[in-house]
Image (tube, rainbow, N blue to C red):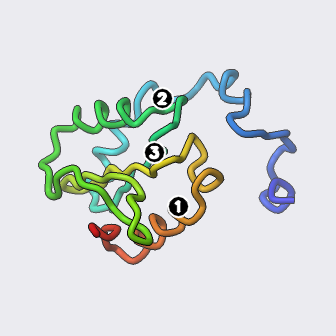
Amino acid sequence: MVQKALHAKPTSWGLCSDVITSWNDRAVTILPIIKYLIANGQRLWVFSGDVDAQVPITSSRYAINALNLPIETAWRPWYLNKEVGGYLEAYKGLLLITVRGAGHTVPSYQPQRALSLFSSFLGGILPPSS
């Protein structure tokens, strides 16, 4: 239904679809795009489930560290209902955030935590620190 509404070529998708293996024109890294967006004042959040085997948080942290952005909020937990929802680190122009107990498709693993994360983003605030 969504594909039809977008006038897209009908494609069968599943979680972590094999379509990605045949996608040959993708960029090796998106770091230049992230730099460009930050330089143009876009608010960016990079999020990852902490049990994501496809794009582990350690890889995201290494990539973000390569940007050499100043840290504005040191690595700390964020909370939902008095429980750790994940961890975050705020840099100048970018927030790196994890979602505890989530895999590659964060909302399907942790819908309440994902909603809290997205609500914070839309509200322009960091998730709660306690």
Cα gap from disc 1 to disc 2, whole angstroms: 27 Å
Q: Which mark is on residue 114? A: 1
In the depicted view, which residue is nearer to us: 83 or 99?
83
- Residue at the limit of the structure toward the front, as seen here: 82
> Would residue 6 be found to the left or right of residue 112 on screen?
right
Q: Which mark is on residue 122? A: none
Q: Which numbered disc, 2 or 3, marks the residue that appears first in the sequence?
A: 2
Circle 1 crowding by C-alpha within 10 Å: few under 14, some 14–19, many from 20: many
Q: Are marks 2 and 3 in contact (CB under 8 Å)?
A: no
Q: Are marks 3 and 1 in contact (CB under 8 Å)?
A: no
Q: Is 37 rendered above or below residue 30?
A: below
**Residue 83: x, y in percent?**
41, 63
Asked if one can make out residue 76 in the rendered structure from this viewpoint, the answer is yes
Which residue has dot 3 on it?
48
Q: Secondary structure at mark 1?
A: helix
Which residue has dot 2 on it?
27
Circle 3 crowding by C-alpha within 10 Å: few under 14, some 14–19, many from 20: many
Residue for point 44% across, 32% down: 56
Three-letter code, disc 2 = Ala
Circle 2 crowding by C-alpha within 10 Å: few under 14, some 14–19, many from 20: few
Three-letter code, disc 1 = Ala
